[in-house]
Amino acid sequence: MRKLEVLPYNSEWPNMFQNEKISLAQIMNDELISIHHIGSTAITILKNVI
């Protein structure tokens, strides 16, 4: 079974997302329409409840 770890919001996540967004856009080229976020923890207003 895989382990799931819920972490408090990290202010560095938006920067990490931008880097991943650029990488994915380069890999996917014309196949990619848009990327808004990766994972629910990237949205600051969500609560850490599963």
Image (tube, grey):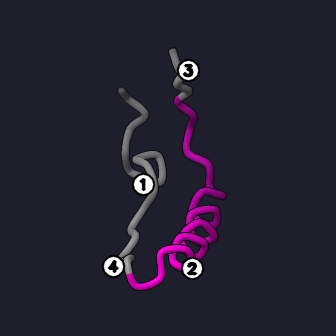
Per the image, label 2 sits on a secondary structure element best described as helix
Instruction: Give the residue number, with chain letter if any, for mark 3.
Output: 3
Per the image, label 1 sits on a secondary structure element best described as loop
Instruction: Give the residue number, with chain letter if any, for mark 4.
Output: 33
Q: Amino acid at mark 2?
A: Gln
Q: Amino acid at mark 3?
A: Lys
For residue 24: magenta? yes
Q: Decide: marks 1, 4 in contact (CB < 8 A)? A: no
Mark whose residue sits in front, 1 or 4: 4
Q: Amino acid at mark 4?
A: Ile
N-terminal of the pair, mark 3 or mark 4, is 3
Q: Residues under labels 1 and 4: Cα distance?
A: 20 Å
For residue 13: magenta? yes
> Which residue lies most toward the bottom here?
30
N-terminal of the pair, mark 1 or mark 4, is 4
Q: Position of residue 40 (x, y in %)?
A: 40, 47
Instruction: Give the residue number, with chain letter if any, for mark 1.
Output: 43
Mark whose residue sits in front, 1 or 2: 2
User: Which residue is more in the foreground, 5 or 32?
Assistant: 32
Q: Residues under labels 2 and 3: Cα distance?
A: 31 Å
Quadrant in which residue 31 is drawn = bottom left
Q: Position of residue 6 (x, y in %)?
A: 52, 30
Q: Position of residue 34 (x, y in %)?
A: 36, 76
Instruction: Give the residue number, with chain letter if any, for mark 2.
Output: 26
Q: Residues under labels 1 and 3: Cα distance?
A: 22 Å
Tell me the residue at 36%/26% (across/down).
50
Per the image, label 4 sits on a secondary structure element best described as loop
Quadrant in which residue 7 is drawn = top right
What stretch of residues is rendered in magenta?
Answer: 6-30
Seen in the picture, residue 41 relative to 3 is either above or below; the reply is below
Q: Residues under labels 2 and 4: Cα distance?
A: 12 Å
